[in-house]
Image (tube, rainbow, N blue to C red):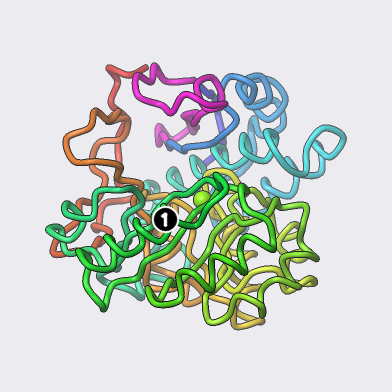
Amino acid sequence: MKVQSLKAVYPNYRNVVSSWRTHLWQIVVEVRTDTGVVGYGYGGGGLASLPIVNGHFSELLLGKELNSPDDIMSMWDHLYFESIPYGRKGIAMMAMSGVDLALWDALGKAERKPVAGLIGGVRKDRIDVYATGPDSEWYAELGVSGQKLTHRWNGTTDDAVASAGAAREIMGDGAKVMFDVYMSWDAEISIRMAKDLAEFNIHWFEDVLTPDDLSALGDLRPKISPINLAGGEHEFGGVGFREIAEYCSYDIWQPDITWCGGITAGLRICELAASLNIPVVPHRGGEVWGLHLIAANDACENLAEMVMGTRGADVDDLWIGNPQIERGRLAIGDEAGFGVRLNDAML
Ligand SMILES: [Mg+2]
């Protein structure tokens, strides 16, 4: 089949977090083919990425053959090369992620296979989940295997100690407990936290410094051991992760499959990670885009993130058919492509 059209839209979100994401949250990309197969993908970059997809990328892919994973990879390389002057990372790559995922969805539908089936087959039937948010009681009831707390440095370790203690008690000794600090700590704070939190057996500290501090992260890593350093959601493509590898910045890599360049980039990142024995735990990996990669790729740990917040909070249901947590785990179904469809009411 051939690519007939490519279109990106920005959904009408009601519940996106009120930082930069209000206008720059996720886009939906639709690819139509000459056989009538339609694929959908989820990308980043919000309103700023629409002209990139609807203008430049759409012109570049019109009429291209879409019959195999290799076709998708060569389209990816073509888009990457042509967008070098303004791209390589950031919004252009977030836009490309949406296009890439739409192409994989379309190929899966054409071949009547889940995307996981196109990239090696399902090798993990049921995937362990960790919940991101503060609601330990809810997560413990769901039976998920871990909880990631968020923290912003405010001059003391006290609140981190309190929240880690509560999470450990409610989630139990076997649970993974992590901290995502969104670049608000520095090396000195991290070492202090590692000491003050030692009794709670913290699995990782995430996003401790900025993605530009790769060398400092590499220096910090052994100093907070046995706590792992995790990161990578702000990095892009195989090239970006090669830099992370050079500095040994993280124990655990967390590419966001809807930002880093889609499944194609995810496969290349996993290949590199596997060669270095570094586990990959994709950012927001409990959403189908990352989940298919986790299910199919041995470089990915058996662990998927669900950003859950608190019980009963309003959420936007943009994608219908997302796998639900059952006995603490997620499984991908046998539906073709990514197995989800759009909630038209949000477009
Ligand atoms: Mg994070």
Residue 5 in sight: no
Residue 196 in sight: yes
Q: Residue at x 54, y 38 (%)?
A: 98
User: Residue 246: x and y, percent?
Assistant: 79, 72
Q: Quadrant of residue 320?
A: top left
Q: Residue at x 18, y 41 (%)?
A: 311
Farthest-out residue, right: 85
Task: Give, as a three-letter code, the residue at label 1.
Answer: Gly
Q: Is residue 32 magenta?
A: yes
Residue 120, compared with residue 336, is above or below; it is: below
Q: Quadrant of residue 326?
A: bottom left
Q: Is residue 158 left or right of residue 175?
A: right
Q: Residue at x 37, y 73 (%)?
A: 200
Q: Is residue 27 magenta?
A: yes
Residue indicated by mark 1 = 285
Mark 1 burial class by Cα count in 10 Å: few <14, some 14-19, many 20+ = many
> Helix, strand, or loop for circle 1?
loop
The residue nearer to you, when weighing 184 against 83, is 184
Task: Report the span colored magenta.
Answer: 10-38
User: Residue 88: x and y, percent?
Assistant: 77, 44
Quadrant, the C terminus: top left
Q: Residue at x 53, y 23 (%)?
A: 7
Count of numbered circles on the image: 1
Q: Is residue 109 left or right of residue 143?
A: right
User: Residue 124: x and y, percent?
Assistant: 32, 73
The residue nearer to you, when weighing 248 against 267, is 248
The residue nearer to you, when weighing 21 against 342, is 21
